[in-house]
Image (cartoon, helix red, strand yellow):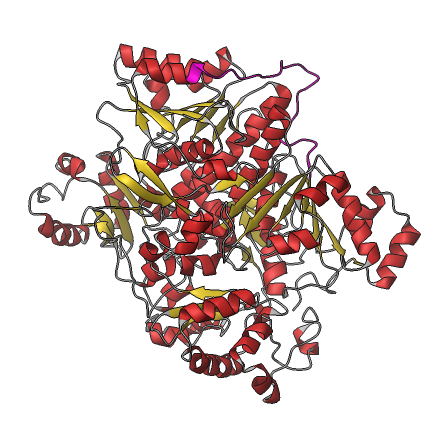
Amino acid sequence: MRTTFSQLPLTGVKIVDFGQYIAGPAVGMLLGDLGATVVKIDPPAGPMWHSPANAALNRNKVIVNLDLKTGDGLEKARALCAEADILIENFRPGKLAALGLDFAEMRDARPELITLSIPGFASNDLERREQRAFESVIAASSGVFTDMGLNRVLMGINPSFSPLPLSSAYAAQIAASSTVLALQSRQVTGRGDHIEVPLAAAVMEGLCYNSIKVADMPERYLTQREKEIERRRVEGLPMNLSYEELQELLDPFFRSYMCKDGRMFYVVCPSHKYHAKRCLEVLGIYDELVAEGLTSEEDTYKPYAEWTSHVSLGVYPMPKDWADHIAARMKEVFMTRTAREWVKLFGRAGIPGGAQLWLQEWINDEYAEAAGLMIDVTDPVYGEMTMPGPVVWLEESGEEALTPEPRRWVGFDEALSVLKKHRTDIPEATEENDQEAWLTGVRVLDLCNVIAGPHSASYLARFGAELIKLDPAEPLYDSWNTVIYGLSQMRGKRSILADLKSRHGRQVFEDLVKTVDVIVWNAPDSQIKRMGLDAESLRKLNPDAIFCKLDCFSGVRRGVRTDYIGYDDLVQAATGIMTRFGGAMDRPEEHAHVGTIDVMCGFGGALSVAAALYQKYRHGRIGRGRTSLSANSGLLQVPFAFDYKGRGLFDEPSGPEANGWDSLSRFYSTASLRHILLCAYEADLPRFRAVEGLEQLPDVAVEERAAYLAHAFQNQPATEWVNRLRAADIGVAICENIDALRARNEQAFDGTPGTDKGSYSFSIYPDHPSGHEVVQLDPYAVRPARGKVYALNPAEKFGTSTRAILSDLGYSDAAVQRMLDAGSLSTSWSAAYLPG
């Protein structure tokens, strides 16, 4: 294990990890990569999930096998827990306590202890809490498989299966970040906490951009795909588009193009003021299209009726006539070069775009290795093994995180000795140092755009942080990207608009930097240095400020693609997610539409902030937190993101025809025409003997099971099968959709965060500042016993707080007005909150 001289931020923090499958062990992995000492407790026969992925999930851990059903095993587990700062488990609510390991009792005896539970469904969800909640059961219950993006709806593939463990990956990032936030709070207050993060709530937070509902959405924001879906529903037409037909409904700056070498290249630059123009310039067709009438509206935040033309380059979505014309020309040009050539041309020109890769290619990609996004670890079982690198790190200690210790099995005495090596200094808890929420008194400056960065900052607001969002006086992104996304990621923030290139705008920026504790930005290193936020320059402005950076491609080390810009979709392309989902190189598909990696990366950013805060309070060092979309893709694909000598085929379910893992874990249609997701294993076969109508399920002839089950499930409606299977404790769920979940679980906003409302909770805002009725997910996935979680204020209009923030900084009204008149500041981008 690592020495006490480690510079990793969580050095000295002691964890006992009871986790199984993905979510619990992944939390231990994330915290172990940040320096925590982790003892993993497995059953005598080993982990409940036998997978090579355990080599990554259990790196930096010593593993001890204990039988918790025996007195000796229980006594040893308690002895290990007595030495720990943090305990992790992810069983059904109450299961560990029933075995004799009651977290509440442990915290009564040791109030400084932090305990983490990650159940499938919330402990206060009386309807679902006892269900066998495997990953795919959570996904089906939470609408994931029926909301896999507009493409799958139009192709009539609904539900649609994906092997990505979205629920576990989101829960791991949320649980890890909240645990370290509680840890840094303990360093201030001396008090621990108990935290619950249900998988169902976690995946819903990942889908918060998919699940929002805005009444009377202006037509300008509806894409060609959304219009086609509505047309077919109104006219009663089937959803049966072919992949090729679907491509013609895509925006030219948001789709894949075939290149000279037979590889697809993904362009993702639909809504930035300059990206689409740069794209056409690199392709050599910008002047040609301008000559044909392509225009760029100067102010796209004006009402659409006031535009000088019906099209504006850099605005999403484009009208169909221009979309078709531009796409046709782009198809021709992309065929003149290889995908590798286009990667270099786009990257150096600052245009988001990249080649489609398979996961196997990404794992062995030279850049991924050079940057530390993929690392080699010599595992005791599989030998030299390539696996995802650290997902979250601090700049000053990231290099150390690239060389994790391989998992190691030890006896009880050695495991106890490993924990006893460290002594944790915790302040005495007094009334004077108590605080209502984990981040009470912490001020955060958010300089981010799009989703991942702004979402990481918004997440901090629910724990009491004060958030200020600084944006340009004139927008760089269109309102689809800023205002629509902002309905979610601007919650809990005050907004100021300033031109940082102007003298007065720069002064306002520096004054803000001097007053905050944390700065969050998703920008390349070159831009950060120009803004004076590199480590050396920031020390001169505010030596105590923590800086957190999120970006697209970076790892611990710099590489040729470190400063290339990009978005969620581009990382899906680069890491094999789109080729797996589409099933072939010539038919890649985006995995859902919003939130696959973006929001998870936001929670990773929050984890880096939390780790830096803990390091500051515990070790007195000011750190710079880091994460990236590419790094988070490793966590999202952890069940199959590895390679070693003798590894089998990369054969996880892929393509639109995939309906599950095997005959016992897949979709089945029922008599009510609703699909259920069955999730069972070979060990569950005896349970089927007690299920009426499934008693004769073949237990040897595996190839006959799917036919038997498909026929049997047609004899009863979905609800009846769910009742029968759950009575036998077999994993199953009806494939829900997000609209139905929202409708059943929405209520008028009552000023609470929704943590008391079970696994699903939405609030209705009839008087939303936008002027539209808005229904959106509550900030409810993290449920602390002690620290308070706040309901977030609805997103204010960009610029609303410009004057108030400057007043707080000591600027006079007259000075503010002069800066507004000079254009250095702004109080709004548009007359309407949501430009129509």
- The kind of secondary structure the magenta stretch mainly shows is loop
Q: Nearer the viewer, residue 543 or 191?
A: 543
Viewer-side residue, 690 vs 543: 543
- Check the image and report above or below for 237 versus 94: below
Q: Is residue 796 left or right of residue 164?
A: right
- Residue at the (83%, 43%) spot, across then down: 809
Q: Which residues are magenta?
A: 419-443
User: In the rendered image, is residue 582 in sight?
Assistant: yes
- Picture coordinates of residue 771, whole percent (x, y): 67, 58
Is 429 contained in the magenta span? Answer: yes
Q: Count the marks.
A: 0
Give coordinates of residue 296: x percent, y percent: 65, 77
What is the x, y in percent for residue 628?
51, 49
Farthest-out residue, bottom: 292
Q: Is residue 626 left or right of residue 637?
A: right
Q: Quadrant of the C terminus?
A: bottom right
Q: Is residue 499 above or below residue 111?
A: below
Camera-side residue of 641 and 215: 641
Q: Residue at x 43, y 55 (%)?
A: 367
Above or below — where is 714 with respect to 15?
A: below
688 part of magenta stretch: no
Outermost right residue: 814
Please state the horizontal and vertical placement of residue 225, each as a whole percent of the image.
45, 70
Foreground residue, 549 or 732? Answer: 549
Q: Report whether residue 768 is seen.
A: no
Q: Residue at x 41, y 70 (%)?
A: 339
- Quadrant in which the N terminus appears: top left
The quarter holding residue 430 reads top right
